[in-house]
């Protein structure tokens, strides 16, 4: 065991928006997904985390956005750190301080950026020189979608059948395609059913097997649309895939309904804006496990879309994101 009595590092990681989504595991404990997924790492929706391992701490403690995390969140982070402590042969408690640039737990993949940042910060603090694929595997153990936030740009997560085979890789760098993700925040409240609780229920939906079959063609089609920068093909696949995920959630037992009245209204509004302009390139929606809508668009449509969104009373805020870089360390600490 190392005789050093303290280790400290800070890392930042972007959230990601999944174009082909992860829903349901073949192994919940290892977070081995039933299907592959594809996403874009976001530049303006990120988590910054400082971790300090020190002998003076009595136990692991976690603070998020200035508030002491509840017991469940703290235990989840502590359990995740055990993998890294064992690898480094270090047995020291840690103080973890995280800040998010977006609402936590509202369906903007805060666990993805959170566990990606925690993994990179802890690995760096503990002097573990790990390749990106291994960081992705480790991040996956904390949150499945965190595996995709280790890399920047456009990222694909391979489901695999074992821990060693399930990790994410970059398929194109951030500069490959200047897509814009306008996140319309309809609710900043933490959702009642988190993704971790939702994944085991996926198998109870009568539509889930049909979804898995559909993804056998959707995933390669989406990969091709991204690599070829085919926006219309991308958008059509994007919306169908989002609806597919939520149909599975809505028909699970018990049912999970993430949408609000505002969610549905904005889906209709976006369709209306496309029809009025007779231009499908205005934007397409996708929705993660939450009520908030991500409008994928291109730079020329951003000002007009923001103006329209700001006129909708149920849209509390907007966040504009571009393809972002992968998780990395910072020299400045949060404490």
Image (cartoon, rainbow, N blue to C red):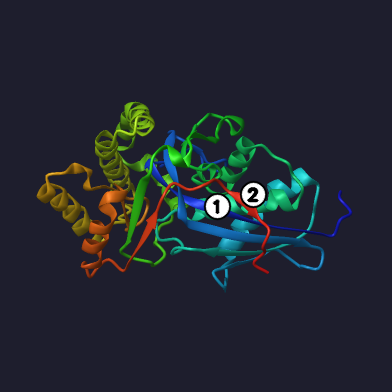
Residue contact at pointers 1 and 2, CB within 8 angstroms = yes
Left or right, 96 with respect to 315, comes to right
Whether residue 80 appears in this view of the structure is no
Percent of width and height locating residue 168: 53, 36
Residue hosting label 1: 13
Label 1 environment density (alpha carbons within 10 Å; few <14, some 14–19, many ≥20): many
Give the mark nearer the N terminus: 1 vs 2. Answer: 1
Residue 51 visible in the displayed image: yes
Give the percent coordinates (x, y) of residue 89: 81, 47
Q: Residue furthest bottom?
A: 67
Expressed as whole percent of the image width and height from the top left, the position of residue 326 reads 55, 45
Kind of element beneath mark 2:
helix
Q: Which mark is residue 82?
A: none
Residue 73 falls in image quadrant: bottom right
What is the number of the mark on residue 120? 2
* Nearer the observer, 47 or 198: 47
Q: Nearer the viewer, residue 281 or 51?
A: 281
- Spot the residue most to the right: 3
x%, y% of residue 307? Answer: 23, 63
In this rendering, the answer to whether 182 lies above or below 240 is: below
Q: Residue at x 19, y 52 (%)?
A: 270
């Amino acid at each position: 065991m190392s005789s050093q009595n303290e280790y400290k590092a800070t890392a930042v990681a972007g959230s990601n928006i999944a174009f082909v989504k992860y829903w349901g595991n073949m192994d919940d404990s290892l977070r081995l997904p039933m299907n592959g997924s594809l996403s874009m790492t976001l530049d303006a929706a990120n988590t910054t985390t400082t971790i300090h391992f020190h002998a003076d701490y009595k136990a692991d403690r976690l603070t998020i956005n200035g508030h002491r995390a509840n017991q469940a969140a703290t235990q989840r982070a502590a359990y995740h750190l055990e993998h890294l402590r064992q690898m480094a042969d270090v047995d020291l408690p840690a103080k973890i301080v995280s800040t998010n640039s977006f609402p936590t737990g509202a369906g903007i993949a805060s666990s993805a950026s959170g566990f990606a940042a925690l993994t990179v910060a802890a690995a760096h603090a503990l002097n573990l020189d790990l390749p990106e694929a291994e960081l992705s595997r480790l991040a996956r153990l904390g949150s499945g979608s965190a595996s995709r936030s280790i890399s920047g740009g456009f990222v694909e997560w391979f489901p695999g059948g074992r821990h060693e085979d399930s990790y994410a890789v970059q398929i194109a760098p951030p500069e490959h395609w200047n897509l814009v993700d306008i996140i319309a925040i309809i609710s900043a409240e933490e959702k009642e059913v988190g993704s971790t609780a939702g994944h085991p229920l996926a198998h109870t939906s009568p539509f889930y097997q049909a979804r898995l079959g559909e993804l056998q063609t959707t995933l390669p089609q989406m990969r091709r649309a991204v690599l070829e920068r085919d926006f219309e093909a991308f958008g059509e696949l994007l919306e169908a895939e989002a609806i597919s995920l939520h149909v599975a959630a809505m028909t699970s037992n018990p049912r999970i309904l993430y949408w609000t009245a505002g969610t549905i209204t904005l889906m209709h509004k976006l369709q209306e804006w496309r029809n009025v302009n007779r231009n499908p390139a205005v934007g397409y929606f996708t929705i993660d496990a939450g009520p908030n809508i991500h409008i994928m668009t291109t730079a020329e449509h951003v000002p007009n879309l923001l103006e329209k969104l700001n006129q909708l009373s149920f849209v509390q805020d907007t966040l504009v994101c571009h393809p972002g870089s992968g998780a990395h360390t910072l020299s400045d600490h949060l404490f």
